[in-house]
Image (tube, grey):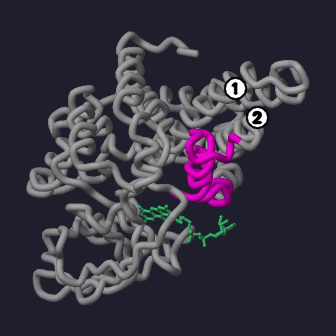
Amino acid sequence: MDAGWSKDDLDVRARAREFTARFLYPYEEELDEAEAVNPETEAAICQAVRDYGLNAINHARTFGGQEMTILQQCIVNEEVGSATNALWGRVWQPPICLKDGTPEQIEKYLIPACRGDITTSFCTSEPTAGSDAGGVKTAAVAQGNQYVINGEKCFASNAERADVNLLTTVVEGRPTLFLIDKGTPGFNVRRLPRFAQRSGHGHPELDIVDMKVPATQMLGGVGMGYELTKDWFVEARLAIAARSIGMAVRASELALAWSRERVQFGQAIIGFQAVEFMLAEMATDIMAGKSMLYRVASEIDHGLDRKVAHAKASAIKLFCSEAGFRVVDKAVQIFGGRGTMCENPVERLTRDIRLERIWEGTSEIQKMVIGGQIRKRGLDMYTGWD
Ligand SMILES: Cc1cc2nc3c(=O)[nH]c(=O)nc-3n(C[C@H](O)[C@H](O)[C@H](O)COP(=O)(O)OP(=O)(O)OC[C@H]3O[C@@H](n4cnc5c(N)ncnc54)[C@H](O)[C@@H]3O)c2cc1C
């Protein structure tokens, strides 16, 4: 299904596919067992990302990014997303809102982040503000030409070691982002809980205690936090959808191959209608998810209104993460007991795909967004076909 993709789009897919096969799949089991990849391998993967032209696919060339279209970004995320334990994270995509920084911030953070010289994390969630992201309590109080920040954060991926953390705060009750350099006193890791994914980095709980940062570390301005994260949500939700499709495609291909090979009751199990029907449902879910993802990605590239893009991204994230979960679960069923062995990619995909229904807005939150749009504007945005 290439749906009229250009030669460039197909080239992007070929590059991302080859990179994933050569530089991500071979390290999956090592990462799963040791919860880390050795530093030489990390360096080789990092160099390969640059060599394959996959660094900062979401940023402009002037900043050192690849300036890919949204459709091409989805193509890359589908391919790299099929690698287990979040190895896709090695293909860095610096937060899109860094482009809204001052010239000094762009020089100090965005350009090195696009090169892959520095790493980033995004710290929004708090113990009492998960789905309710508007409930963030971490407070930044002006004190001369600096801000003093106090609060708690949880599960911010990579925050324990990122070179710069984008921190969501409130300034006089208004959502505001700050750029926090690694090692800033008062930015404390309280605990590094273990999660189902063995990505090689943490999702820490953080205490932020009397942390002083110069006012120049604010991104955008007081009250700009929500506005700056809007585009991030569209990008992140489409990326999740693309990865979910990538995982589903991989799981279904593995399950198909196994169903042809595995013999029970004197015949290959694909010959049983129960198994064939599972494969049929898997293919149908993938086809539907892929169709909506790439259609809307192309619409965004052709100037879709920002609000509409935001609303549609919710529906795509909802469907693709749920459909991907159904597909991966059926793949495990087709493998039988072998589908639960950690050495089998479908077992690891089970752990990965489960998370996609939760972060960047749970399925229930996506339904709230979609429902709210339907109440305001009617169904046409989702069901119309212009
Ligand atoms: C591995 C991992 C990595 C993460 N990385 C980051 C990160 O890098 N940065 C960051 O800021 N956060 C991160 N998070 C946090 C993540 O964004 C939150 O877990 C997610 O937003 C859900 O919040 P919660 O876990 O507090 O669940 P809750 O908000 O407590 O939700 C619990 C349940 O209640 C439901 N619910 C809540 N409100 C409603 C409602 N109004 N209507 C219907 N149902 C509702 C939810 O859908 C869910 O089913 C990460 C989480 C994990 C697990």
Q: Nearer the viewer, residue 166 or 296?
A: 166
In magenta segment, residue 363: yes
Above/below status of 108 relative to 340: below
For the point 80% across and 31% down, the residue is: 278
What is the secondary structure assignment of the residue under circle 1?
helix
Q: Position of residue 322 (x, y in %)?
A: 68, 46
Q: Nearer the viewer, residue 35 or 165?
A: 35
Q: Is residue 30 left or right of residue 197?
A: left
Q: Is residue 84 left or right of residue 61?
A: right
Q: Tags 2 and 1 in contact by the CB under 8 Å rule?
A: yes
Q: Which residue is mark 2?
A: 334
Ligand number 1: quarter of image:
bottom right
Image quarter of residue 203: bottom left
For the point 51% across and 39% down, the residue is: 243
The boundaries of the magenta stretch are 338-367
Q: Which residue is mark 1?
A: 258
Q: Is residue 322 left or right of residue 127?
A: right
Above/below status of 219 relative to 115: below
Q: Position of residue 375 (x, y in %)?
A: 71, 54
Q: Position of residue 186 (x, y in %)?
A: 23, 84
In magenta segment, residue 204: no
Disc 1 marks a residue whose amino acid type is Trp
* N-terminal label among 2 and 1: 1
Counting other residues with Cα less than 10 Å from the Cα at mark 1, is it few (<14), some (14-19), or many (20 or more)?
Answer: some
For the point 41% across and 12% down, the residue is: 6
Q: Position of residue 12 (x, y in %)?
A: 36, 21
**Residue at disc 1, CB closer than 8 Å to ligand 1:** no
Of the 4 image quadrants, the one containing the C terminus is top right
**Residue 303 visible in the shown view:** no
